[in-house]
Image (tube, rainbow, N blue to C red):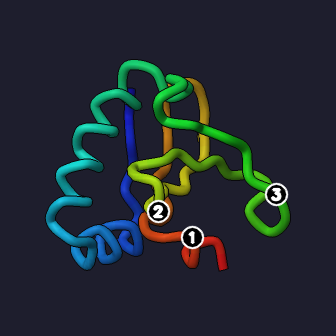
C-alpha cells in the first residue's frame, strides 16, 4: 500500500496533540492492513468532499483521504470536525 501525505496533512498533523499523533500511528497501522476495518469507521463523504473518505482516529479526530487507485491513498487532512470546512 502506498500512502501520500499532502503538505497540508503534515502541517495539521504536527499541530495535533502528541496523544492524537500516537493514536493516528496506531490507526494508520490498521488502515494499512484494511482501510475499511470496522474499528476505523471509514465512510464516504458528501458535499464538496464527495470524492473523499474519512476514518476515525478518536471520537473527535478524523483523517480525510482519497482513494487514488488500488492500493494508493492520499491523506488530505487530519483534525477535528472543522477540517471538513
Q: Earlier in the sequence, mark 3 or mark 2?
A: 3
Which dot, 1 or 2, sits closer to the camera? 2
The crowd level at tag 2 (other Cα within 10 Å; few <14, some 14-19, many 20+) is few
Residue 7 in picture, x, y percent from top left = 36, 71
Asked if the residues shown at circle 1 and circle 2 are in contact, with their CB atoms under 8 angstroms apart, the answer is: yes
Which dot, 1 or 3, sits closer to the camera? 1
Residue at the front extreme, as displayed: 59
Residue at the top extreme, as displayed: 33
From the viewer's perspective, tell me whether residue 17 is left or right of residue 33: left
Residue 37: assigned label: none
The quadrant in which the N terminus is found is: top left
Q: Which residue is pictured at 73% across the width and 44% down the height?
A: 44
Q: CA distance from mark 1 to mark 3?
A: 14 Å
SS for callout 2: loop
From the viewer's perspective, tell me whether residue 32 is left or right of residue 77: left
- Which residue does the numbered mark 1 point to in the structure image? 81
Q: Earlier in the sequence, mark 1 or mark 2?
A: 2
Q: Which residue is pictured at 67% across the width and 41% down the height?
A: 43
Asked if the residues shown at circle 1 and circle 3 are in contact, with their CB atoms under 8 angstroms apart, the answer is: no
Residue 58 in picture, x, y percent from top left = 40, 52
Residue 60: assigned label: 2
Residue 14 in picture, x, y percent from top left = 22, 73
From the viewer's perspective, tell me whether residue 70 is left or right of residue 46: left
Q: Which residue is pictured at 60% across the width and 41% down the height?
A: 68
Which dot, 3 or 2, sits closer to the camera? 2
The crowd level at tag 1 (other Cα within 10 Å; few <14, some 14-19, many 20+) is few
Amino acid at each position: 500500500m502506498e500512502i501520500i501525505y499532502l503538505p497540508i496533512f503534515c502541517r495539521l498533523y504536527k499541530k495535533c496533540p502528541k496523544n492524537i499523533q500516537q493514536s493516528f500511528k496506531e490507526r494508520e497501522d490498521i488502515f494499512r492492513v484494511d482501510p475499511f476495518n470496522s474499528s476505523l469507521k471509514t465512510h464516504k463523504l458528501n458535499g464538496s468532499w464527495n470524492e473523499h473518505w474519512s476514518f476515525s482516529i478518536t471520537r473527535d479526530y478524523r483523517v480525510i483521504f482519497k482513494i487514488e487507485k488500488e492500493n494508493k491513498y492520499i491523506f488530505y487532512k487530519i483534525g477535528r470536525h472543522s477540517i471538513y470546512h
